[in-house]
Image: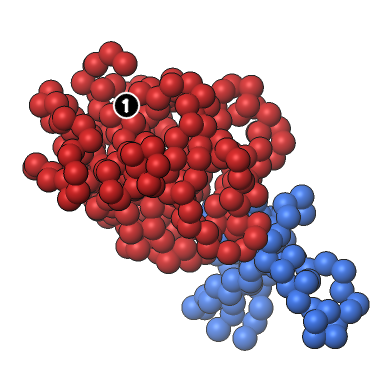
């Protein structure tokens, strides 16, 4: 069953409090090479059947209207993944 | 419905003329503070009308309170799923109509109003990442909205604050416009509890009928239950403001 993957990230200009907490925890585990972390979201939309252009367009619209809030987030990727 | 104060005297002698004003209080799955909001409406003298998120009619209410809580468990983003409830479409249309339905969003209700684009900006996680519950001083920056007319401009009020996703953010252009248009309705005083831009605790739309804030005025309406100083009833003004506006009373 094919899936449409949607990736959403906080806008670059917005401080990501969760990412900031994670970057603070990494050195405590010995991971010292990472200067910043930003935490986003990945959605997987399963499609029963073929992913047509119309279905992909629906996924893009859902990504912009429900899955992300354009005030604070960007949809950075929408792609089809075959199972 | 008569509301007996649990402790002490009723803070407001409920005026019978206010009884005719019907204030809807919306319940979503996961809403917490609907009963307190309804009680605040009644203590202020109005009639509270329970509204369910799946309702498709507004039941002839004169105003709507969207109370706090964790609608849909804050899944996806706080308020993001509630925003698409059937009743929200009605509320959004009525708030934008010529009738300018008064709408107050408290905490999760504020988040729902920003997700609905009735108010600009958004809330993200508190800058310190913790859930915070405290009595919070706010300054009333705009007392010309339908929800704040009973306060003095610049009046400081003390109401409870309790949230995890309370950090108000918007881009600089939006913030500048809010300031220039006097649409910052409330600001945190003395302590910014969540990193909100420019200490903003609540905002209004341009028409002054839609107001949202993170702190909880509905928890400060009755002696013995609100914050211990200021009689604990500083939040009552939200509800008397809108009731007086509805019945056409002067300030």
Residue at the (48%, 57%) spot, across then down:
B133
Q: Which residue is mark 1?
A: B241
Residue B3 on image: x %, y %: 13, 44
User: Would residue B2 be found to the left or right of residue A37 on screen?
Assistant: left
Residue B156 on image: x %, y %: 48, 31
User: Would residue B78 be found to the left or right of residue B22 on screen?
Assistant: right
Which chain gets the red colouring? B
Parent chain of label 1:
B
Residue at the (71%, 69%) spot, across then down:
A21
Q: Secondary structure at mark 1?
A: helix
Seen from the viewer's position, the closer of residues B232 and A28 is: B232
* Quadrant in which the N terminus of chain B is drawn: top left
Seen from the viewer's position, the closer of residues B70 and A72 is: B70
Seen from the viewer's position, the closer of residues A81 and B189 is: B189
Residue B185 on image: x %, y %: 51, 30
Packing grade of label 1 (10 A; few <14, some 14-19, many >=20) is many
């Amino acid at each position: 069953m094919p899936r449409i993957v949607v990736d959403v990230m906080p806008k670059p200009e917005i401080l990501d409090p969760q990412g900031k907490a994670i970057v603070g925890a990494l050195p405590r585990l010995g991971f010292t090479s990472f200067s910043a972390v930003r935490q986003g979201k990945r959605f997987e939309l399963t499609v029963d059947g073929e992913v047509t252009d119309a279905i992909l367009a629906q996924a893009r619209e859902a990504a912009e209207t429900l899955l992300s809030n354009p005030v604070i987030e960007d949809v950075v990727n929408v792609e089809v993944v075959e199972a | 419905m008569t509301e007996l104060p649990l402790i002490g005297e009723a803070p407001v002698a409920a005026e019978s003329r206010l009884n005719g004003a019907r204030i809807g209080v919306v319940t979503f799955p996961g809403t917490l503070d609907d009963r307190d909001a309804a009680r605040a409406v009644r203590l202020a003298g109005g009639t509270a009308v329970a509204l369910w998120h799946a309702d498709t009619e507004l039941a002839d209410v004169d105003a709507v309170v969207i109370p706090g809580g964790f609608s849909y468990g804050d899944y996806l983003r706080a308020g993001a799923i509630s925003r698409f409830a059937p009743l929200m479409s009605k509320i959004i249309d009525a708030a934008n109509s010529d009738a300018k339905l008064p709408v107050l969003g408290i905490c999760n209700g504020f988040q729902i109003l920003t997700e609905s684009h009735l108010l600009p900006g958004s809330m993200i996680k508190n800058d310190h990442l913790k859930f915070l519950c405290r009595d919070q001083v706010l300054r009333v920056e705009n007392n010309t909205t339908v929800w704040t007319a009973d306060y003095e401009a610049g009046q400081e009020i003390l109401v409870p604050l309790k949230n995890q996703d309370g950090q108000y953010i918007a881009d600089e252009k939006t913030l500048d416009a809010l300031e220039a248009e006097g649409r910052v309705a409330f600001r945190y005083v003395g302590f910014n509890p969540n990193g909100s831009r420019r200490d903003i605790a609540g905002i209004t739309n341009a028409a002054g009928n839609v107001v949202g804030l993170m702190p909880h005025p509905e928890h400060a309406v009755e002696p013995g239950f609100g914050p211990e100083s200021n009689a604990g009833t500083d939040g009552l003004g939200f509800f008397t403001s809108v009731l007086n506006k509805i019945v056409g009373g002067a300030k």
